[in-house]
Image (spheres, rainbow, N blue to C red):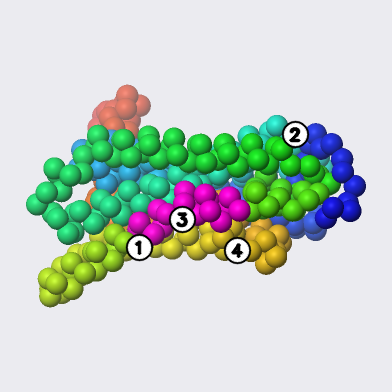
Amino acid sequence: MATRNRTEVTEFVLLGLSSWPEMQPVIFGIVLSMYLVALMGNALLVIVALSDPKLQTPMYFLLSQLSFIDMFLTTITVPQMLVHTLSANRTISFNCCMIQLFFFMAVGSMEGHLLAAMAYDRYVAICDPLRYSAIISHHLCLRITLTSWVVVSLNSLLYSVLVTRLTFCDNQVIHFFCDITPLLKLSCTRPVVNEMLIFTEGVAVVVSPFFFILGSYARIGIAIVRMHSVSALRKALSTCSSHILVVLLLYGSVIRMYLRPSSSYDLDQDRQVAIFYTVVTPMLNPLIYSLRNQEVKGALRRLFMKLSISGSFQPGSQVNRRCQHVS
């Protein structure tokens, strides 16, 4: 790497998902469809969680925040990728690239922290139900959310600043957005400090929520075994199954993309994992929580009933009814 020519990079060229021109319209259509489904699904879940009186609980407050994060995460990367897919100009300025890197890392890390908070909520609800309302409150969830935002923002800022101090030998980014791994690959010298941070400070901020989730579910499992109750096991599975599935989707992608030695990186494969992480997972999350959660399905039915009733009492509909009655 040290023998490569050093140049002052003022912009990067994002090569996108595929180098085959004939595949670009197909990619555009598929990704746009998934992006719209992800936005509509998560927006609907946010509206239901915040407006339905029966969902005014800390758990559904955290779920609404997770849906908001999913909308933010996919919007950071996908619109730009869609524009570049059908455009000959795929450049992004250096400053815009660093801004995108900052927000992507902050929002991506925040998703793990919210899932950890949701795991703690489930742990208290199952293992200490009598004290649930005394332990878990909206104020506690709000403090956890704000504290997590501060932590992930500082972590992301540190990474972004370190990347800006690198010397780049090329500006061809083998990716569809500015991510930490493909940017490090463009460095003229091996970025030892950055790689050390990924496996030390990065593990502390990004992976520690995962270990917290594992610990919470280990305690839940022990509590269920001590109950010797099949009904308690079924209730716990129905309560936690959606959350567990979302955790597996998130951290399966994160571990695959970032927590590996640099020698084992395959940027082509990482682009495929990234599209799953930034588009497919945000699209699946609201479906998982709505299809496997009776309370959410009930809230959705009530919302649609309200919309249909309000529509039936619009002035135009009343005039039509009168005309039909007269005729």
**How many residues crowd mark 4 within 10 Å: few (<14), some (14–19), many (20+)?**
few
- Badge 3 element: helix
Magenta stretch encompasses residue 203: yes
Asked whether the beta carbons under mark 4 and mark 3 sit within 8 Å of each other, the answer is no
Mark 4, residue position: 260
Q: Secondary structure at mark 1?
A: helix
User: Which residue corresponds to mark 2?
Assistant: 93
Q: Residue at x 75, y 57 (%)?
A: 18
Closer to the N terminus: mark 1 or mark 2? 2
Q: Is residue 127 left or right of residue 244?
A: left
The disc at residue 207 is 3
- Marks counted in the figure total 4
User: Of discs 1 and 2, which sits in the foreground?
Assistant: 1
Residue sitting at 78 percent across and 51 percent down? 189
Residue at the image position 56 percent from the left and 56 percent from the top: 199
Q: Nearer the viewer, mark 2 or mark 3?
A: 3
Earlier in the chain: of badge 4 and badge 1, it is 1
- Per the model, the C-alpha gap separating discs 4 and 1 is 20 Å
Q: Quadrant of the N terminus?
A: bottom right
Which disc is residue 265 wearing? none
Of mark 4 and mark 3, the one earlier in the sequence is: 3
User: Where is residue 319 shown, x and y percent of the image?
Assistant: 31, 26
Residue at the image point whose x is 39% and y is 59% from the top:
211
Query: Hey, what amino acid is under mark 2?
Result: Ser
